[in-house]
Amino acid sequence: MLFEKSDELLERELKVSPLAAQTYSKSYRYFCKGMAPSYMDHGEGCYIFDVDGNKFIDFICALGPVTVGYNEPAVNKAVIDQVNKFASGTLQSELEVRLAERLCEIIPCAEMVRFVKNGGDATTAAIRLARAYTGRDIVLMSGYHGMHDWSIGASTNNKGVPKAVCELTINFTYNDLEDLENKLKANEVAAVILEPIQSNGPKEGYLEGVKELAHKYGAILIFDEVVSGFHYALGGAQEMFGVSPDLVAFGKGLGNGYPISAVAGRKDLLEQIEKGVFISTTFGGDSIAMAAALATLDILSRPGFYDHITKIGTMMRDGIQERIDKYDLNDVLSVSGLPAHCGVAFEGHGSLSYLDIQSVYSQTMLQSGILIFAIYFLNSSHTEKEAQAYLDATDKAFFLIRKAIDHDSLEGILIGGKVDPVFKRNIK
Ligand SMILES: Cc1ncc(COP(=O)(O)O)c(C=O)c1O
């Protein structure tokens, strides 16, 4: 495969835009260097055509937003119809009423909804509502919740966030109720926010326990369903596990790639927006994204939608484990995720770092015509055919990883440059 045009564009963009991508995880540094396209011409279902005319099966789905496939006719039609009317207007669109009503129907905890644009806007809005309601400042979080100060301040990527802000957010460990309770006891907590599905999902009773503890200590429970929302079940993880939070943040999967996010939940919490809790953005009512979201929800609501995703995902998840066993790689590779959103986790071995091993994986998947980092996203147009292509490529990648480990070297195996994410894990 040749990437002449991609490479030329990348060189030009690097001169004028840092990392040559507006989302960290879309940067060229997340792929095996020299082996990947950087620029997309168009998409069709679960396929991507790059600017050099190469075709790939896409298991990244724009980092989650593309839930019903690229260039989906019903979504296109809804968008084009609205484009011919207006985008952001002086007055609200009727679509806003319909979308809010629809979300209140399908999301268990939603009594009211407020629309914003990015996932981080929605989680930030939820935190502000919780702080205003409780009159407390401290936030306990588990997972990634976006770029805003309250959240990124508590991560290792907190350069530029004032220390005083960093100190108001404390991380807790997923699937560990004791850790949560200790932190709730030791602090006056406004909100407990977590991604309800992390790694291989919640332990039996974990989410129920989080809710009970949050309420016992007077905190608001927020589910960050920016990733889990619309990928596993129509009503999100809260429907799947039968535990409703007080507030929820949605983003990514709602508009099939059109930018829209929402905070939803208890009426008494959302109503604070009418009483001085400031949550407002110019493009919050963007009617194009709302048209896309309504058309997307129609497709997501079709009978069998999530059965299909789960079936394809189960085939892939089981197939990964079979191949880990086949190549005796359980000490370096593991399956991470539930069927709808799952993949491979890498560990270092001998003198090879986890990124060395991930680079071999990335290179092989790209050479096999598959775009993926480590964890796949699915949309409704992935079928058994694409799942099988993924597994065939995975087999080749694991074969080469076995070889690299046996030789304790990448020589003759890694042709491209190493995967070099901006944020690296703090282990070998
Ligand atoms: C769980 C979770 N919450 C929030 C966000 C932030 O969303 P956005 O990047 O749209 O602001 C992300 C983004 O990846 C996410 O994965």
Image: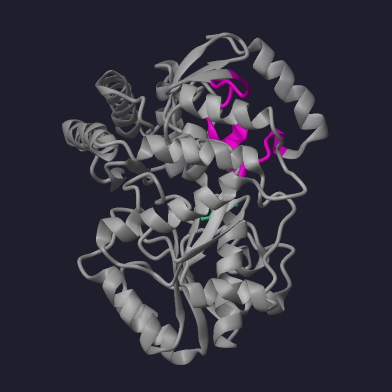
Compared with 329, 201 (above or below) is below
Q: Quadrant of residue 208?
A: bottom left
Range covered by the magenta-colored residues: 19-41
The residue most toward the right is 16
Is 268 displayed left or right of 322 in the figure?
right
Please say whether residue 18 is one of the residues in the magenta stretch.
Answer: no
Q: In the image, what residue occupies the spot 66% across and 78% down? A: 275
On whether residue 31 falls in the magenta region, the answer is yes
Residue 392, image x and y in percent? 27, 20
Percent position of residue 107, x then y: 38, 57
**Up/down of 153 relative to 63, above or below:** below
Q: Quadrant of residue 39?
A: top right
Which residue is located at x 65 percent, y 62 percent? 148
Side (left or right) of 103 relative to 424 = left
Q: Position of residue 147 (x, y in %)?
A: 63, 57
In-front residue for pair 335/237: 237
| Front in this rendered view, residue 285 or 234 | 285
Q: Is residue 189 left or right of residue 240?
A: right
Whether residue 225 is situated above or below residue 212 in the rendered picture: above
Q: Pinpoint residue 52: horizontal percent, then vertical percent.
A: 61, 10
